[in-house]
Image (cartoon, rainbow, N blue to C red):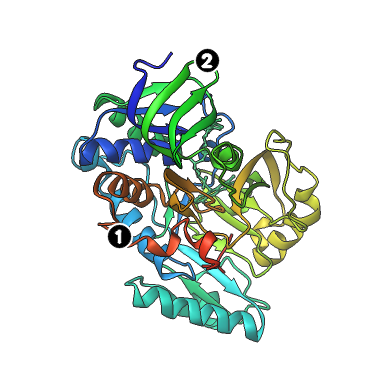
């Protein structure tokens, strides 16, 4: 049961986005917050199944700004969460991202994106194929026309540790977490008046945040709001590559879309599915065949050290994919002004959590964006017919 029958803010979904919103709400001034999360183990949340990497290399300025906020936040995690100075509670590793382009058009697109990133303050460097081979001698630059490398502000971290810090911090500051499921919203006069919980009855609420990942569309639909968010499956492989032990590589994205990065003594790697249909949100069966079919041939050709490798493990997770423009939908839906959306992250939500949590909290408490102008990502763009297409989807 929820501790009270009425809250200022009810948040549906308590993984990294919902918990970031809750934590920032307490920092900015309200504690009467209820987070409804059906699975406190988070076993199937994208947050737990993520590659948990952060990059500045996006095509939309607002996404670059969000990641610049994100990396500054991650670097200062010890201070934000009252840890000893010098602690690295998120195990942040800034190995960078390396994006490889093929063909003339690929090189032109990379060049254009890099200019956008640099205008936002990112330090992305362009590398011609010979410079690429010199800088990363373990990599074969054959067929690459241009590469972009972010030497600072990009890398990976412990995503579950970030969730844990937000969640513990929110609870310590007075937020209530309940192991329950939002089954729907009741509306009165165009606004949500109550959240209905599977076990906890009806809870009156001033504001609502939908942060339920791939389940966000079905929840929003109960308030009469249609969201273009659907689950898209991604299978990630944990790979043992003995010849590459100790290579401090960046997260590298091949022109084919195959990506790989070190993970301790092993490597993570995945191939983008083609086709990439919407899937049953309960289908978490890894596509084991993708290893031989899509992944290994590309890896072995690009990095000779991947010729003799073994898949040690594989898992599948879901992107909450926004089919409208592959970017987050943030803030109130025009048809329901106290229903705030924080969904549709399309594979880049973990790194965005610090900025999105803050932005949604500002919107709820102060009525506008403050630290960052997130207006380009407003949910209202659906009604306006405005698309903010993100080209750099991994
Ligand atoms: C394989 C993979 C790799 C990724 N790699 C990266 C990466 O490198 N960098 C990056 O930034 N992002 C990455 N992402 C994306 C990132 O993980 C997600 O964008 C982010 O975790 C989304 O967080 P969330 O809290 O919105 O959703 P989720 O983590 O999916 O959490 C949603 C929560 O809502 C809860 N819920 C569901 N239904 C209800 C209901 N009815 N009522 C209440 N709660 C409900 C669920 O139990 C769940 O805990 C990746 C994702 C995947 C799958």
Disc 2 on helix, strand or loop? loop
Judging by the rendered image, the residue that carries numbered circle 2 is 199
In the image, what residue occupies the spot 40% across and 17% down? 2
**Looking at the image, is 290 positioned above or below residue 158?**
below
The furthest residue to the front: 189
In the rendered structure, the answer to whether residue 66 lies left or right of residue 83 reads: right
Density class for disc 1 (Cα within 10 Å; few <14, some 14-19, many ≥20) is some
Location of residue 196 with respect to 68 vertically, above or below:
above
Residue appearing at x 69%, y 67% in the figure: 256
Of the 4 image quadrants, the one containing the C terminus is bottom right
> Where is residue 344 drawn, in percent x and y?
54, 51
Picture coordinates of residue 126, whole percent (x, y): 47, 79
Question: Left or right: 63 with respect to 101?
Answer: left
Question: At which x and y percent is residue 242?
Answer: 62, 48
Q: Quadrant of residue 273?
A: bottom right
- Is 90 or 121 nearer to us in this picture? 121
């Amino acid at each position: 049961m929820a501790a009270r029958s009425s809250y200022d803010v009810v948040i549906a979904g308590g993984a990294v986005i919902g918990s970031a919103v809750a934590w920032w709400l307490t920092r900015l001034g309200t504690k009467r917050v209820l987070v409804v999360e059906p699975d406190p183990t988070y076993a199937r949340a994208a947050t737990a199944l993520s590659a948990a990497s952060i990059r500045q290399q996006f095509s939309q300025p607002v996404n670059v700004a969000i990641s610049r906020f994100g990396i500054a936040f991650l670097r200062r995690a010890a201070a934000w969460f009252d840890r000893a100075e010098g602690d690295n509670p998120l195990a942040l590793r800034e190995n960078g991202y390396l994006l490889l382009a093929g063909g003339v058009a690929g090189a032109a697109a990379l060049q254009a994106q890099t200019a956008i990133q640099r205008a936002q303050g990112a330090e992305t460097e362009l590398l011609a194929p010979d410079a690429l081979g010199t800088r990363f001698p373990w990599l074969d630059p054959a067929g690459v026309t241009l590469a972009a490398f972010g030497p600072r502000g990009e890398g990976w971290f412990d995503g579950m540790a970030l969730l844990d810090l937000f969640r513990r911090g929110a609870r310590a500051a007075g937020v209530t977490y309940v192991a329950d499921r939002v089954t729907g919203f009741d509306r009165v006069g165009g606004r949500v008046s109550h959240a209905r919980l599977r076990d906890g009855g009806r809870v009156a609420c001033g504001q609502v945040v939908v942060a339920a990942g791939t389940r966000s569309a079905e929840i929003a639909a109960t308030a009469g709001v249609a969201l273009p968010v659907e689950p898209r499956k991604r299978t990630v492989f944990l790979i043992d590559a003995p010849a590459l032990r100790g290579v401090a590589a960046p997260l590298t994205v091949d022109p084919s879309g195959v990506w790989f990065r070190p993970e301790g003594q092993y490597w993570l790697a995945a191939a983008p599915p083609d086709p990439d249909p919407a899937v049953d949100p309960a289908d978490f069966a890894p596509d084991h065949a993708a290893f031989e079919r899509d992944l290994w041939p590309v890896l072995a050709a690009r990095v000779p050290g991947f010729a003799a490798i073994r898949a040690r493990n594989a898992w599948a997770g879901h992107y909450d994919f926004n089919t409208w423009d592959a970017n987050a939908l943030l803030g109130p839906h025009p048809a329901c002004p106290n229903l705030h959306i924080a969904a549709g992250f399309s594979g880049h939500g973990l790194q965005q959590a610090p900025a999105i949590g803050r932005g949604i909290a500002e919107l709820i408490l102060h009525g506008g964006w403050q630290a960052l102008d997130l207006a380009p990502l407003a949910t209202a763009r659906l009604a306006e017919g405005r698309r903010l297409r993100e080209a750099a989807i991994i």
